[in-house]
Image: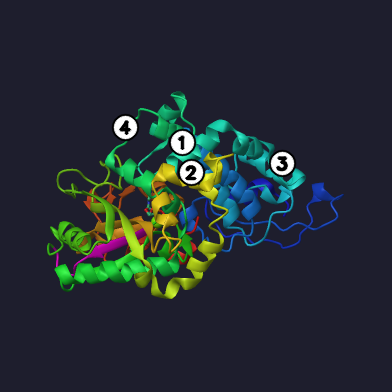
């Protein structure tokens, strides 16, 4: 590779570039090992990103800084770190030298400094000091409560609240979501397994079909991308006849509630009307479907085939990670009392026979289904990049409801994800390769 600017320019323009594996760069004559150079297009939605991340040490470091920025309401900085991490996730081999990063998109000075630190010293000093900082630790613990975002956590921290005990001792009133979040804190901070997601899927699907025969339900979010664990379970529900889905959510929720499956739920109405406000208008593309945020009660009987995950959790019970963060020097029982679960644990049986799981339900009319499916499969960065590509490269506006072509001043219809990629002039990327 002789001309790095030609290489960079070619990548930006999306032209194919032949990469010479193991080619030795002239300025690296003293370097003993030969370097492998990577070719990466600049938008994550142009890349195939599987779960086989070859650069986890580097991406973990960048993701932690992204998280810290997001928790501090510095969205721009958060996105920059997420983009940098996503580029490294898409590489087929581990990065071993800074030279290999030349010409790669999305790597700003700050991210490069972090990567250099990790490559040279085995860890990033900025990441290590962030992890140790009281503010980061407090933000993590407090936003670990369902219903608590970075703004609320920040307000509490300024009032001197850094952990759950201090929160409990304070005069702060919690809303209904936060009360439920606190009550099920440990469960909700425990990853959900694929087996648990499938077990919940069966229950929810049965409820959906019983209140509306012919309705269909699809697993979305991280599990659709092939992840084995997640922080919640996301489902998309529709009916093949347009309009039949109207009013479905309250019926599904009532049914699940009557069956005793819901520990908490909050339903929001669909407010999307294409004619009134086009897809370019919504301040957020996430909040216009009929949607239900819930905490699901998954009992052992329903969990059936999940004994293994259960055993692992039990053997893990004494390490109790979420408690360790905020109960230094206190006994487990004392900590449990904070969350009101001591009673459950002190029963003769020894442990509770169910766990709480965050479950999100979304209902979409069939005409918007492909857009909803694409928009809710993620990853978050992949979605963000799809929208950026649509806007910047195609003068189109993509949401989870529709695709609007500004040049033609019309909506582009689609009944499959493949069609949407094709409208956008992108090669189809299957869900398992959207893990940017
Ligand atoms: N989503 C998005 N933008 C957001 C939030 C969500 O595009 N700000 C989309 C992409 C993923 C999907 O919604 C579900 O969201 P999460 O459950 O938060 O993401 P996930 O990928 O399923 O992650 P996890 O496996 O941890 O649940
Ligand atoms: Mg999810």
Residue at numbered disc 3:
117
- Asked whether 176 or 88 is in front, the reply is 176
**Viewed as shown, does residue 301 lie left or right of 246?**
right
Tag 3 secondary structure: helix
Give the spatial CA distance, label 2 vs label 4: 20 Å
> Which tag, 2 or 4, sits closer to the chain's start?
4
Is 67 part of what is drawn in magenta? no
- Circle 1 residues within 10 Å: few <14, some 14–19, many ≥20: some
Tag in front: 3 or 4: 4
> Which tag, 2 or 3, sits closer to the chain's start?
3
* Residues rendered magenta in the picture: 233-242
Residue at numbered disc 2:
335
**Viewed as shown, does residue 268 lie left or right of 178?**
left
- Asked whether 40 or 250 is in front, the reply is 250
Q: Position of residue 10 (x, y in %)?
A: 58, 52
Are circles 2 and 4 on residues that touch, CB within 8 Å?
no
> Which tag, 1 or 4, sits closer to the chain's start?
1
Q: Quadrant of residue 423?
A: bottom left
Q: Quadrant of residue 93?
A: bottom right
Question: Magenta segment, principal secondary structure?
Answer: strand
Residue at numbered disc 1:
165
Give the spatial CA distance, label 3 vs label 4: 43 Å
Instruction: Evaluate whether residue 23 shows in this view.
Output: yes
- Identify the residue at image location x=48%, y=33%: 72
Are circles 2 and 1 on residues that touch, CB within 8 Å?
yes
**Viewed as shown, does residue 306 lie left or right of 409?**
right
> Which tag, 3 or 4, sits closer to the chain's start?
3
Tag 1 secondary structure: helix
Residue most toward the top? 159
- Identify the residue at image location x=65%, y=39%: 128
């Amino acid at each position: 590779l002789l001309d790095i600017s030609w290489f960079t320019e070619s990548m930006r323009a999306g032209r194919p570039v032949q990469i010479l594996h193991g080619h030795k760069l002239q300025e690296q004559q003293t370097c003993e090992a030969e370097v492998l150079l990577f070719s990466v297009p600049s938008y994550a939605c142009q890349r195939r990103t599987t779960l086989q991340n070859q650069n986890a040490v580097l991406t973990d470091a960048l993701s932690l800084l992204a998280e810290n920025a997001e928790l501090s309401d510095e969205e721009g900085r958060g996105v920059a770190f997420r983009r940098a991490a996503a580029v490294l996730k898409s590489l087929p081999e581990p990065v071993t030298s800074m030279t290999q990063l030349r010409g790669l998109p999305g790597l700003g000075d700050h991210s490069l400094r972090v990567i250099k630190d990790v490559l040279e010293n085995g860890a990033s000093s900025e990441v290590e000091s962030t992890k140790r900082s009281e503010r980061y630790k407090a933000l993590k613990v407090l936003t670990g409560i369902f219903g608590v975002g970075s703004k609320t956590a920040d307000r509490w921290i300024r009032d001197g609240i850094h952990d759950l005990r201090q929160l409990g001792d304070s005069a702060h009133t919690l809303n209904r979501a936060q009360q439920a979040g606190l009550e099920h804190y440990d469960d909700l901070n425990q990853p959900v397994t694929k087996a648990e997601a499938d077990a919940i899927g069966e229950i929810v699907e049965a409820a959906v079909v019983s209140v509306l025969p012919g309705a269909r339900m699809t697993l979305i979010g991280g599990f659709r991308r092939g992840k084995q664990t997640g922080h919640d379970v996301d489902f998309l529900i529709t009916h093949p006849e347009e309009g039949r889905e109207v009013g479905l959510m309250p019926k599904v929720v009532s049914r699940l509630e009557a069956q005793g499956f819901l520990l908490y739920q909050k339903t929001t109405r669909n407010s999307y009307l294409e004619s009134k406000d086009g897809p370019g208008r919504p301040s957020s593309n996430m909040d216009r479907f009929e949607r239900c945020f819930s905490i699901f009660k998954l009992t052992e009987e329903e969990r059936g085939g999940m004994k293994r995950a259960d055993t692992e959790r039990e053997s893990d019970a004494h390490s109790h990670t979420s408690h360790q963060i905020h109960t230094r020097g206190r006994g487990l029982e004392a900590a449990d009392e904070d969350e009101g679960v001591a009673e459950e644990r002190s029963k003769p049986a020894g442990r509770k026979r169910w766990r709480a799981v965050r479950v999100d339900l979304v209902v979409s009319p069939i005409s918007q289904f492909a857009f909803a499916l694409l928009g809710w499969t993620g990853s978050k960065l992949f979605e963000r990049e799809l929208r950026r590509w649509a806007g910047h490269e195609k003068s189109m506006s993509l949401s989870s409801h529709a695709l609007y072509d500004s040049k033609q001043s019309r909506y582009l219809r689609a009944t499959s994800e493949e069609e949407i990629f094709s409208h956008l002039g992108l090669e189809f990327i299957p869900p398992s390769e959207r893990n940017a």
